[in-house]
Image: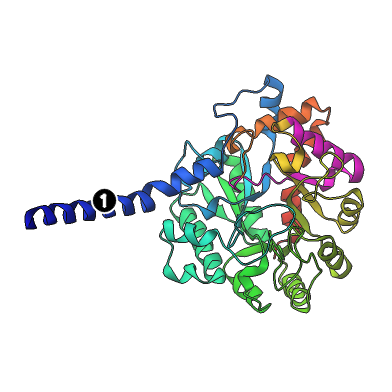
Amino acid sequence: MRRWGKIIGTAIAVLAVAGAAFFFFFLPGIVEGQMNAVRQKPPYSVSERAAALHKTLTVADLHADSLLFGRDLNRKSSSAQVDVPRLIEGNVAVQVFSVVSKTPRGLNIEHNDANSDNVTIIAVANRWPIRTWTSLKERALYQASRLKAFAAASNGRLTIVETRRDLEAFLERRKADPNMVAGVLALEGAQVLEGDPDNVATMFDAGYRMMAPTHFFDTEMGGSAHGMDRGGLTDAGREMIRQMEERRMIVDIAHASMTTIDDILAMATRPMVVSHTGVKGTCDNNRNLSDDQLRAIAAKGGLIGIGLWETAVCGTDAAATARAQKYVAGLIGAQHVANGSDFDGAIETPFDVSGMAKLTEALIAEGVSDADIGAIMGGNQVQFLLDNLPQ
């Protein structure tokens, strides 16, 4: 019996180790692959005209959540949607990497409270430092350090941009070698401030240059379009905006409630972005912006990033995104339109980032001029960053 007891005990221990190994080393990749699915796998083909035009563009994207997961972004993956090699294949010059610190269970675009959190299990499964398991601020600081580590290990293929001078220097280097990409750090939701607007300085010092007051739930700073109250900026939120503007941090109003958007527009002295969204003019739901909101954002010099997922554009192909971009360009001018993919944001996209030429082709099919395509695909984003990043 003792011998059988030892055998059973050993078997249980082996199974426990195997289960832990599966949890820590294999399960995160499987889960990410399912969360960030791609409808059409590479390689991608486009018309000769689209390929030739796309090659001449300086492509940029305002929103990808790729730092949330455990992959080495310097290594090309066959799953999910973004890594440095595929950014280069897609001719993407500038990618904004947005950091997700907390999402509610049962996430939806109507009503979410802040009483649950999906990211804790991701932090544990991906072996983030223990301090990140209970602190949203520490999650933001850790994810910033991950991007910096990727840049340091990239042999110059990934550069982090924090200032106008950084971006100018990068663009000059890229003229000689297009096999490189610039990353800009952003925060999806001000819950990382943990209720204290003075933590804006902490995030700025960590390299963040863009932040939204809310994500899928109301925060101490303001109401979310998908929260329970959908209120406006709080006093702390107003102080957050003031401190961001002092440092030339870009305010992102994606996911903000109508009242929060109005409050920011009323007090902002600098242009803002909507990093990833859709518009009611082509896809009418609670996630998307109205024509009046688009006009008000444009009047402040703002930039609208149009997404690649079905809820944003009411379609599952590049044509749906191109239709929305053309609609916005017709309403407020092409100079206010951008890409806001939401790659790796727990969505299914029509292609991964190496297939960005598919969107160029779709814009051609919509009858958009080459000059406006160049602006929408990246020219607007690059100029916005040059104009609004710290010097």
- Toward the front, the furthest residue is 1
Compared to 246, does 319 lie above or below?
above
Looking at the picture, tell me which residue is in the foreground, 236 or 257: 257
The amino acid marked with disc number 1 is Leu
Q: Residue 222, can we see it? A: yes
In which quadrant is the C terminus drawn? bottom right
* For residue 222, above or below residue 10: below
Relative placement, left or right, of 347 versus 257 is left
Task: Identify the residue under disc 1.
Answer: 15
Q: Where is residue 199, by image quadrant?
A: bottom right
Residue 108, given in percent of the width and then of the height, sits at 69, 52
Q: What stretch is highlighted in magenta?
A: 319-346
Q: Does the magenta stretch include residue 323?
A: yes
Report the number of discs: 1
Q: Is the magenta stretch mostly helix, strand or loop?
A: helix
* Residue 299 screen position, x and y as percent: 91, 56
